[in-house]
Amino acid sequence: MTRNWQQPDWPEFTWDPNRLAVADQQFLLGAGVVVGTVKHLGPEDRDRFVVEALLTEAMTTSEIEGEILDRASASGG
């Protein structure tokens, strides 16, 4: 995967604001679902949810960087 700073137009790149608007809208809707979910969980379930969200984020970030992690080993199970 080519990094941003490896692009020929770096750092003078451009973007499509319409595509960003769609992604932003999807993010806001998803964030609302997460906030609504967390508000209705008890403390133990909330903690589990947060750990799961953080683990998913770490796994996804690692994949972007080209590192494929084993979810079972990452969660200690």
Image (cartoon, rainbow, N blue to C red):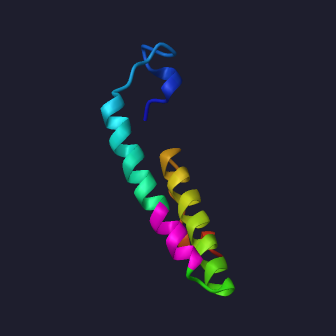
Name the one closer to the observer, 69 or 49. 49
Is 10 included in the stretch rendered in magenta? no
In the displayed structure, would residue 2 be above or below residue 73?
above
Q: In this view, does 59 lie to the left or right of 76?
A: left
Q: In this view, does 63 lie to the left or right of 42?
A: left
Residue shown at 43% from the left, 52% from the top: 27
User: Residue 45, image x and y in percent?
Assistant: 61, 84
Q: How many labels does the image show?
A: 0
Boundaries of the magenta span? 32-39
In the displayed structure, would residue 12 be above or below residue 63?
above
Q: In this view, does 58 lie to the left or right of 15?
A: right
Residue shown at 49% from the left, 16% from the top: 10
Name the one closer to the observer, 18 or 54. 18
Residue 50 in view, yes or no: yes
In the displayed structure, would residue 28 be above or below residue 24?
below
User: Residue 48, image x and y in percent?
Assistant: 62, 79
Residue shown at 49% from the left, 30% from the top: 3
Q: Quadrant of the C terminus?
A: bottom right
User: Residue 66, image x and y in percent?
Assistant: 50, 46
Q: In which quarter of the image is the N terminus?
A: top left
Residue shown at 37% from the left, 52% from the top: 26
Name the one closer to the observer, 11 or 45. 45
**Please, what is the dominant secondary structure of the magenta stretch?**
helix
User: Residue 9, image x and y in percent?
Assistant: 43, 13
Residue 72 in view, yes or no: no
